Image (cartoon, helix red, strand yellow):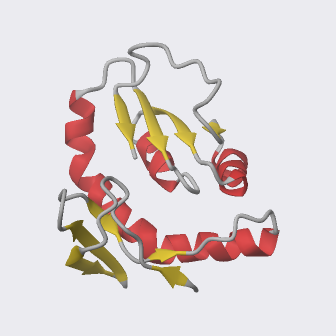
Amino acid sequence: MQTILVNCEFCGEQKSSLIANIRSLKIDRCNHCGLIYTNSRVLWDYSNNSRQIQEELQTYKQYYWPARYQSAIKVWDTLNRYRQNGWLLDVGCGFGLFLNEARQHGWKVIGVERAGNKAAWAHENLGFPVWTSLEHQELSKGRFEVSTL
């Protein structure tokens, strides 16, 4: 698995401080703006090779999903306070595991994932809509109570 160190995606700062190490996943805080993000990142191959997507899915389940799942458990009560019509949008939904969990908690879900193979996998295997872009989507005001990134 090949990884790369990244700058802060919000302000571009190169310097960050390690705040947690969860199952080999390093969580950094930007020294300039305070954004918390994963660093380093897996270099994903966005090909449509079915073996490759299975390898990416297994890596995601092993390294990323446990940390994201622990975060999700802590926020369900907060998210439910915002529920009116029950819609949740997850931008960068990957394989859709968080959306699947949200759906199990009663949310109606839509994902956005620019990697077409992951979007297709989530739609085909988990059965909810996953867009590859927000461009050309009808996003009416108030449709989503919650957006996660």
Q: Residue at x 22, y 65 (%)?
A: 30
Q: In the rendered view, tell whether residue 108 sits above or below residue 117.
A: above
Q: In x, y percent, where is residue 31?
A: 17, 68
Residue furthest toward the top? 141
> Residue 88, how many percent across, how many down?
42, 33
The residue at the point 57 percent across, 32 percent down is 134
Quick one: 106 or 96, which is closer to the camera?
A: 96
Which is nearer the eye, 105 or 52?
52
Question: What percent of the width, then of the height, locates residue 40?
Answer: 41, 77
Residue at coordinates 55% horizontally, 51% vertically from top-left? 96
* Residue 149 position within the rendered picture, expressed as x and y whole percent measured from the top left: 40, 47
Q: Quadrant of residue 82?
A: top left
Residue at the right extreme of this rendering = 49
Q: Is residue 43 left or right of residue 89?
A: right
Find residue 1 and report its image quarter.
Answer: bottom right
Q: Quadrant of residue 110?
A: top right
Relative to 96, say whether 67 is above or below.
below
The residue lying at 48 percent from left, 43 percent from top is: 91
Q: Nearer the viewer, residue 4 or 85?
A: 4
